[in-house]
Amino acid sequence: MIIAIALSLPFIVILIARPVLRRLALRNAVRRPRETLLVITGSMLATALMTAAFVVGDTFDASLRANAYTQLGPIDEVASVPLADASVLDHLAALRSPQIDGVLRATTTGASAAVVNSAGIASAAAPKAQLLEMDFAAARTFGGDASATGISGTTPGPGQAAIAQPLADRLHIGVGSTFTAFAFGHSVQLRVVQLLPQRGIAGWWTGREFVSYNAFVAPGTIARLAANSKVVAAPPQSSVLVSNLGGVESGDARTAAVVHTMDAALAGTPVKVETVKHDALDLAKTAGKSLTQLYQALGFFAVAAGILLLINIFRMLAEERRSELGMLRAMGMKRRSLVGAFASEGWLYAVVACAVGMLAGLGVARLVMAGAARIFNQRDPDFRLPIRFHFTTQSLQIGFTLGLVIAVITIVATSVSISRFNIIAAVRDLDTEKHAPRRWARVAWGVVVLLGATLLFAGITSHGVVAMLLGGGFAAVGTRFALRDRIAGRLLVTVTAGSALLWGVAAVSVAVALGGDLPIAGFIVQGVLLVIAAVVLVTEYQGEIGGALSRLSGRRLSVRLGLAYPLARRSRTMLTIAQFAIVVFILVYISVLAAMFGSQTDSVTAKVGGRATVYVESNRANPVPFGQLKAAGAQAVAPLVNVVADVTPPHATKSTKSFMSGFDSSFVSMGPPVLSDRGRFQTDADAYNYVLSHPDTAMVDDFFLSQGAGPPSAAVSIGDVITITDPLSGRSQHVTIVARSQNDWLGNGGLTSAATLRSIYGPSAVASHAYVRVASSASFSHTLEARYYQQGAKADPIRSLVEQRLSRQTQFFTLMRAFLAVGLVIGVAGIGVIMVRAVRERRRQVGVLRSLGFPAAQVSNAFAIEAMFIAMEGVLIGVVLGFLCTWSITLSNSFGDGLSFRVPVTAVSLLVGGTLLGALLATWGPASSAAKIKPAVALRIAD
Amino acid sequence: MAILEARGVRKVYRSGAQEVEALRSVDFAAEAGEWVSVMGPSGSGKTTLLNCLSGLDDIDAGAVLLGDRELHSMSDAERTQHRAASMGFIFQAYNLIPVFSAVENVELPLLLAGADARDARRRATETLERMGLSHRLRNRPNELSGGEQQRVTVARALAGRPQVVWADEPTGALDSETAAIVMDLLAELNGEGLTLIVVTHDEGVGRRAHRLVQMRDGLIVSDERLARVSA
């Protein structure tokens, strides 16, 4: 906000201290309210999009941050060991420190829960439940705020359970009802004595789901279930929970100090302290930030359109007031004052536009989040993130300030540029003569060429697509201006813009071929470069395009007149075309990607499932006996060990939580998922077999360790060494990545051998998941879930999982398109502004035409044709570039191989039709008013 | 025979509550092939008379007869068509379309009258050649001098071979030499049968007509038949 105020100060000073400039700025601003409204509408949209991007981040941050209250509350750190080793934690349990305000012991195990009738049939089941034991009196005092713990009442007695509300809802039970918990091959019937909210300790959940199916049971219940178990299962855990002094979030500030104290208390043991609160808050922050960045990056295209609109508006204002400005200069007004008056008027528009845009941004974000909530609601209920719309005043301030900074810089630069006119030429409304470039300008452009060449070279050697694209762009622009008086204009423009266009399309493929990738920044630079090059090229050949269209129309007069103005006012036309092109480009790009990804069901199913057809998950504490599945009709079964690991990527000091899955030879023999990069191996089977026989190797996908949206901050590549650590025991192992798997659509995490995970996790590494090949996926899945409800079995046809994922992905693309469609409003508003001004500028000419016998309908037709021509060119450039880029991406396999280019005919038709219709509607008013101009009135006013 | 006759034409300009009576029941007639000059001080109603009689502006009372048809009873489209077919206009400020070249400006009324594009271009070129502008066909108005622009305007007014040409201060923006050239041209065309109605402040221009109509405060105060003088 300080920046916004500092930026505004010069204009405030001008408006207060310079009465003449104030009068000029204020009176011009209020003279034509309708146009002022259009200018503000066009200018506010950029601020709205930027604000919306920040508020989307705030909302995701708040939604994830809410987990700190619902699933942790006062719990800041946790240290866990297998129940059998509980005594290891005795010393920690007795810990006292001025940094902490609570230490609590707890015993937990994964389980499944069901309401079973007398015939042994489950009427309701919760496959992923958790049994917990703790002293309720101690839990309530934990952290100093009883309400934050969610715990009330007394510790359940034998056969009793206090259950969290989500479990009650899932099983359709309440106080007094009974249900059965299953774990370690045993079961226990429990009577509900109390319902607890999903909050604090009552909501403490050790999995990654957002829902806590918790059942608090009497001390000793879990040990009895685990005793004499014949099932190979993950053992129960004994944990010590620690609460840092301070509130749910404020206590995080003491995490480092408390961990230090806890580590000292655990000295000599392999136990690792988990900073659960810090990790949850960190995840919220990371996810919120990455989503803000994603939406900002997408919004950049619309913001660029907004900047072009501002430039256009101010150039038109200057053209309209040219003789007035010339007179002011003739009367002795300094150029500096002229810039001051013009920029102050612009600042007035910008302040109002940014304030309105900031509020509009809240509305845009609200719509985006409503769409996001719909998408999340299609996920597995356990992983549905409850969306809590939230914004911070800081985000609003940043949105406002960014909008104002962009607007003011654009306005001041444009004001300076338009203040450089010849006074006589301005007063007499003559064309300004063009001068040959000065020597220093030629040298400066030469430096730009050199800079471009250097960047290009650096980009190629480092495989950096951003530097490659920027280098090509700078070289082309520099060459264009350095040689403009040496080489014929058309030849020079054709060669430089054409080269930039070709390079813009090819650079990504070249970078990918060299081993680089396409980051979001590269995508933005590519879009901007292509649009600039294409628009410049089209503008150079406008005469030919207009001539051809005129001939096509049989040289109809309204067509010739409609085309004459855009062809004559090329810089204005160029800016407006670019407004449309840049937004349509990104919309088409996303539409094609959505279509390409959306049509991949068959190929993705084959890749992620291999030859399996069903994916099975079950409770780690009571897994499905996979050996029995063949008897149930499975043609092949490949069990997987699935664990949660702390993974430390190379060169990182901090670990990230991730799933890791361990496979055995049955996985390879069944036909495993297809690898996206098998490294040095000849076949996928060779790579899998190598991992099986080398316990220090693993495979990961592109999004391994990703948190929030977009790729992970630390990408793991073939040849990298990562460290896998068991968070319970602290045991770890370094493994080398030898191949890359397909995107992890089934949630396996990294892949290594089951033996490797067993060596790290010991008895906790149980085979709880499996790939299964069956003849009829749907019926098998249904039967399996019914038969193994005690094991918490969840079976899904892989095709169905892929379809769900693709559907969510498609909807996410739709959400992005909706967000970006706001940018089209800028283009449409731009056309509206131009047409309103055009009618005003040409009143006299319309009067002349009407006096010559030009029918009113043809006048409005000519204006409509003019708007359509500009919009159509912009839209066509955007569509063609969008297709070109996505097509080149398919060729280079930037988004994975096997992705085939696809034209989303309906989506693109709607986009093109909608944009043109919007432009036509925006032109309707000005065109109609032009048609109504009385010839004598127009001539009288003008003369 | 009168090619145009105005009876009791009244025109009032309104701005808020204020009314200005620009024409007060004016009667006027012009014969085919006649050259009528309209003179008078600023605000006397000269341009308003031209606008109302040519159909560019509406009237509040009276009638303008073109043969047996009343101009202001025609629809806007009919009046527009009539202008395209039988009228030409010359303005003081040239009023050329800046994005069209000289030849494109001149062929405009021909195309509006429904002429074939090739024929329109040929006739426009011929007319410009007659105006001595054969070397300026492709130039846009901002590339022409004031005299050249006015000659293009005259060419545009004449290219469609209209029955009547209305000229509002045709020499107002020209130096005396160029003004004489333009007026000689108009006189030559009038000699070929063109009806010419010229609004002017310039006594010399006004006195070259067959008739000189003087206006004051929205009324025709004199209507004098003149002996033609040569340039």
Image (tube, rainbow, N blue to C red):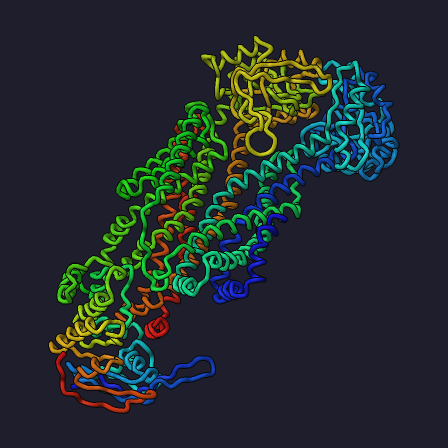
Kindly indicate the quadrant of the structure image that contains residue A208.
top right
Residue A903: percent from the left, percent from the top?
Answer: 39, 38
Left or right, A209 with reference to A410: right
Viewer-closest of A770 and B130: B130
- Say above or below: A388 vs A662: below
Viewer-closest of B117 and B171: B171
Q: Outermost residue toward the left?
A: B192
- Say above or below: A408 vs A646: below
Q: Outermost residue toward the bottom?
A: B221
Kindly indicate the quadrant of the structure image that contains residue A934.
bottom left
Q: Outermost residue toward the top?
A: A693
> Which residue is found at the position 60% from the left and 38% from the top?
A376
- Say above or below: A904 vs A932: above
> Which residue is found at the position 38% from the left and 51% from the top?
A871
Left or right, A8 with reference to A462: right
Can the viewer see residue A672 in this picture? no
Residue A912: percent from the left, percent from the top?
Answer: 40, 48
Residue A435: percent from the left, percent from the top?
Answer: 32, 49
Viewer-closest of A516 and B181: B181
Left or right, A593 with reference to A571: right
> Which residue is found at the position 84% from the left and 27% from the top?
A103
- Say above or below: A423 vs A262: below
